[in-house]
Image (cartoon, rainbow, N blue to C red):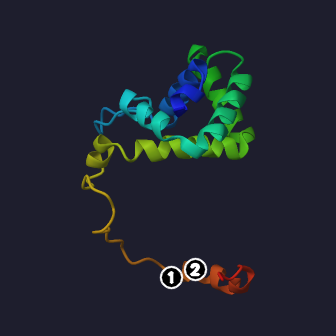
Amino acid sequence: MSAANELTRAQRNDLRTLAAMIVPASDEYKVPGADDPAIQADMLATLGRDTALVAQALDHLARLAGQPLAELDPARRDAVATEFRATGGAAAATLVRVVLQCYYRDDRVLRSLGLELRAPFPKGYTLNEGDWALLDPVRVRAGTLRRAR
């Protein structure tokens, strides 16, 4: 069964509405919002192991909203979203991650960022040299991680 069939119509509608709130369309950058039909289709097609947590997050959102999110006035919708971020826990974080990962792999978005439309490997991407001292706290606690066998 596909993820689209595992989410109810109301959940899919709330997902679309919330996605538009997370990443709205931009005329300035000529990019769609995360509620774009192609991006939404990608989300539903690739939910996979995240389906249960996303459904849980959408159920929590529906309880907070008390009605479909799209039917709320903008101020109430923003208040519900703020409460959702504060109380949604891992499920809300998973939902936001899903929205962002699908949005940032859309060709139109990649083009607007000046990125080549290709997989990151095998060519890879060049990263600017960073401040290696930022890893010092990790090096200090090096013995706390379990060693691979």
Dot 1 corresponds to which residue?
132
Q: Where's residue 78, x and y in %?
A: 61, 28
Question: Which residue is located at x 44 percent, y 29 percent?
Answer: 35
Q: What amino acid type is highlighted by mark number 2?
A: Leu
Q: Where's residue 55, x and y in %?
A: 65, 33
- State whether residue 108 is above or below residue 35: below
Asked whether 42 or 35 is in front, the reply is 42
Q: Secondary structure at mark 2?
A: helix
Question: Which residue is located at x 64 percent, y 79 percent?
Answer: 138
In the picture provided, is 24 more to the left or to the right than 106? right
Q: Where's residue 58, x and y in %?
A: 65, 30
Question: Which residue is located at x 50 percent, y 27 percent?
Answer: 16
Q: Quadrant of residue 120?
A: bottom left
Tell me, yes or no, if residue 139 can be seen here.
yes
Q: CA distance from mark 2 to mark 1?
A: 6 Å
Tell me, yes or no, if residue 82 can be seen here.
no
Q: Where's residue 71, x and y in %?
A: 58, 13
- Mark carried by residue 53: none
Quadrant (top left, top right, bottom left, bottom right) of the C terminus: bottom right
Q: Quadrant of residue 88?
A: top right
Asked whether 144 or 113 is in front, the reply is 144
Asked whether 25 or 16 is in front, the reply is 16
2 and 1 marks in contact (CB < 8 Å): yes
| Label 1 packing within 10 angstroms: few (<14), some (14-19), many (20+) | few
Q: Secondary structure at mark 1?
A: helix
- State whether residue 24 is above or below residue 132: above
Name the residue furthest front.
Answer: 1
Q: What amino acid type is highlighted by mark number 1?
A: Trp
- Mark carried by residue 135: 2
Quadrant (top left, top right, bottom left, bottom right) of the N terminus: top right
- State whether residue 107 is above or below residue 81: below
In the picture provided, is 149 more to the left or to the right than 101? right
